[in-house]
Amino acid sequence: MKTPRGYEGRRIQQTGGSTFAVSLPKAWVRANNLTRGALVYFLPREDGSLSVYTEEVPKLEKVRRVCLVTNKTPPDHIFRRLVSVYISGAPLVEVRTKERMDPSTREVVRKFVQQVIGPEILEETPTGVVLQDMVSSNPMPLPSVLRRMHLMAREMQSDAMTGFRGQDASIARDVADRDWEIDRLHWFVNKTVVMALKDPRLLPTLSITLPDCLTYDLASKTLERIADHAVRISRVTTMVSDVRLPATQVEQLAKLSEEALVFLDSAVETIFTGDIDKANEVIDGVGKTLISRGPELEQIFAKKGRVAVALAYVLESLERTALYAADLAEIALNHAVNSERPPPPSPEGSRFTEG
């Protein structure tokens, strides 16, 4: 029986005292080359549904993606294409050109391998490179990856402000050089989430649920943006390393940075604890802190030239870091509410009755 919405309907049959059976759609059985006596697997879902699979685990080794490029394709475009293919979750990727692959194109592929987690060069031919993801079947736990991203983003922000206060261009360059490390973790979270959404059989191996996927993906992107603002501050430092910055305003910005990092620490922790009250404290605290910065804005805008531009850029990045901490707290709040178990029904029944 096929429903108007396209579902295959089957009635449950009781074949024994405690055994229930349901038939499978003939078209699905034939499409998967199943015969009498074949074993199928069931995966209960949190929403009460039941998924049926022909294999207990997905055969990822069968998935192979071909990435066609040309030697004239800009390196950045090739790199972005490879990141997109990586996030799609394909364990085998062949980067191929119609003509002989130029050394410059191969160098982009090698750079990509160095900057992502998992892929290694499996084979090289005159017209292509084959990459194999070495961790696709045994991914790292996402909570651990997020905690690592938090620590990295936090240290980048702290070091960026240290470099700015001391007008130390070497510290600033070091912060910028670390940006790719947090990018690779963010891409890894993206990839893991995409794989889990494509095949829920991976969820038990990751010890997460589908709602967790959305939470971790949003949190990962937010942490990556915080790191981007740390890089922005470091670039400002290199721009004004030869001018004298007003000590009062610099110290005010340093204080705002410290407050933003406190908010960040608390927000990330609420993602894992589900502390709704703490998440609300972070959101409220960020709002009050930014409102109180009005006088500092006036002092900064009173400056002229490169100094004013530098101070304004740093202030904006610090404000964005605080606001991203509030975003993380909202992500934690939404996740905590969605994860709450409904209270047991009242013994007296519901006070809402039909009337």
Image (tube, helix red, strand yellow):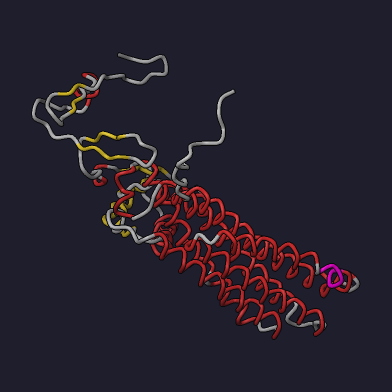
Q: Quadrant of residue 35?
A: top left
Residue name at image x 55 percent, y 62 percent = 223
Q: Position of residue 190 (x, y in %)?
A: 45, 52
**Majority secondary structure in the magenta region:** helix
Q: Is residue 157 above or below residue 243?
A: above
Residue nearest the observer in this picture, 167 or 15: 15
Q: Position of residue 317 (x, y in %)?
A: 70, 66
Q: Quadrant of residue 19?
A: top left
Q: Is residue 163 above or below residue 235?
A: below
Residue name at image x 41 percent, y 54 percent = 102
User: Magenta part of the protein: which range?
Assistant: 293-297
Q: Position of residue 283 (x, y in %)?
A: 66, 60
Q: Position of residue 60 (x, y in %)?
A: 26, 46
Magenta stretch: residue 316 in it? no
Residue name at image x 73 percent, y 62 percent = 287
Q: Quadrant of residue 201?
A: top left
Residue nearest the observer in this picture, 132 or 124: 132
